[in-house]
Image (cartoon, rainbow, N blue to C red):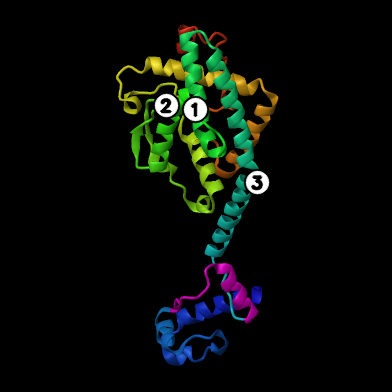
């Protein structure tokens, strides 16, 4: 292979130094299979481009090597190979592991939240668990085809579902009451391969984009005073953090998903459960003053 690479590099240097057909004729290029109608172009520019029937560089390089033709390894092959490896390994993880892990996490948190929602007597606490339940119910709709939303939640869940499926752009989230760009939920790349990956994409996109904001401002909510919404969201995030932190199985699953995600796409810019570990979490979520201090 080194000989082949050297050969083509040598030819390029010589070609670029040639200024006439007579000089080009001094170079042995009979084994390179250059079409006669490309010789003039090659003489003038030192290279020429030609379409092939190959759909990816691997097959082309394989054929050139098989025919003992000179090969120049360019950076595009390396980058393309890295992209394919990245895409393939991520797809395999998503199909065979991450999908199921995300489903277990989502389903378990939904059941915990819905039970707490039904049992809560305090209207404010009930409202928070209502929000949390919906937060997990929407992605569960994609991860579990047998999931049927309860009648008291169905309208809001279906409204979110319709916006996600329409993926037309910005709209106010029926569940979270702030602006969301639903065009981002349109599956792309390897997520168009099959229905399972499409559903995984939408569920993961929901978790990646929908958050419990510390300070949902007017731009997001369309409201000048969003303090009440901020308090509700922070309380919700604390409840979710505590539920996962105090459940060994859920904590292991969350860390597994998070570690793989960080390895492939980098550390999240948003506050995660790991960040919450470094904070002093308010013990009494009913105390709005403590919540506001926590936000500050």
Residue 110 is labelled as none
Image x and y of residue 240, in percent: 56, 22
Q: Position of residue 51 (x, y in %)?
A: 46, 75
**Residue pictured at 58% horizontal, 40% vertical:** 261
Residue receiving disc 2: 175
In this rendering, the answer to whether 53 lies above or below 132 is below
- Asked whether the residues under the numbered discs 2 and 3 touch, taking CB atoms below 8 Å apart as contact, a structural biologist would say no
For mark 2, give the secondary structure.
loop
Asked whether residue 212 appears in the rendered view, the answer is no
Residues shaded magenta: 46-68
- Mark 3 is surrounded, within 10 Å at the Cα level, by few (under 14), some (14 to 19) or many (20 or more) other residues, namely few
22 is higher (above) or lower (below) than 152: below
Which numbered disc covers residue 135?
A: 1
- State the separation of the CA atoms marked 2 and 1: 8 Å
Q: Where residue 154 appears, x then y in whole percent?
A: 45, 28
Among numbered discs 2 and 1, the one appearing first in the sequence: 1
Given residues 108 and 245, the one toward you in this image is 108
- Give the percent coordinates (x, y) of residue 163: 39, 37
Report the residue at 38% width, 42% height from top. Answer: 166
Quarter containing the C terminus: top left
Q: Write down the residue under mark 3.
A: 96
Query: Which residue sits at x=46%, y=8%?
Result: 288
């Amino acid at each position: 292979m080194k000989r082949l690479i050297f050969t083509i590099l040598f030819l390029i240097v010589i070609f670029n130094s040639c200024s006439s057909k007579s000089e080009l004729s001094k170079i042995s290029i009979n084994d390179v299979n250059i079409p006669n109608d490309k010789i003039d172009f090659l003489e003038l520019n030192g290279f020429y481009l030609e379409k092939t029937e190959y759909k990816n560089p691997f097959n082309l390089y394989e054929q050139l090597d098989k025919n003992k033709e000179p090969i120049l390894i360019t950076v595009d092959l390396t980058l393309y190979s890295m992209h394919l490896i990245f895409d393939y390994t991520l797809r395999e993880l998503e199909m065979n592991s991450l999908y199921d892990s995300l489903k277990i996490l989502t389903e378990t948190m939904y059941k915990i939240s819905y039970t707490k929602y039904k049992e809560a007597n305090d209207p404010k606490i009930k409202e928070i668990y209502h929000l949390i339940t919906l937060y997990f119910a929407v992605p569960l709709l994609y991860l579990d085809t047998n999931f049927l939303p309860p009648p008291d939640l169905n309208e809001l869940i279906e409204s979110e579902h319709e916006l996600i499926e329409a993926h037309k752009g910005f709209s106010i989230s029926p569940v979270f009451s702030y602006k969301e760009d639903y065009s981002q939920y349109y599956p792309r790349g390897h997520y168009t391969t099959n229905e399972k990956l499409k559903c995984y994409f939408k569920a993961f996109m929901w978790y990646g984009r929908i958050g419990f904001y510390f300070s949902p401002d007017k731009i997001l909510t369309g409201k000048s005073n969003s303090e009440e919404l901020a308090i509700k969201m922070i309380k919700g995030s604390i409840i979710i953090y505590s539920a996962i932190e105090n459940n060994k199985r859920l904590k292991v699953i969350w860390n597994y998903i998070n570690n793989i995600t960080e390895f492939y796409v980098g550390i999240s810019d948003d506050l995660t459960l790991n960040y919450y570990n470094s904070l002093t979490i308010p013990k009494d979520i009913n105390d709005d003053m403590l919540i506001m201090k926590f936000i500050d």
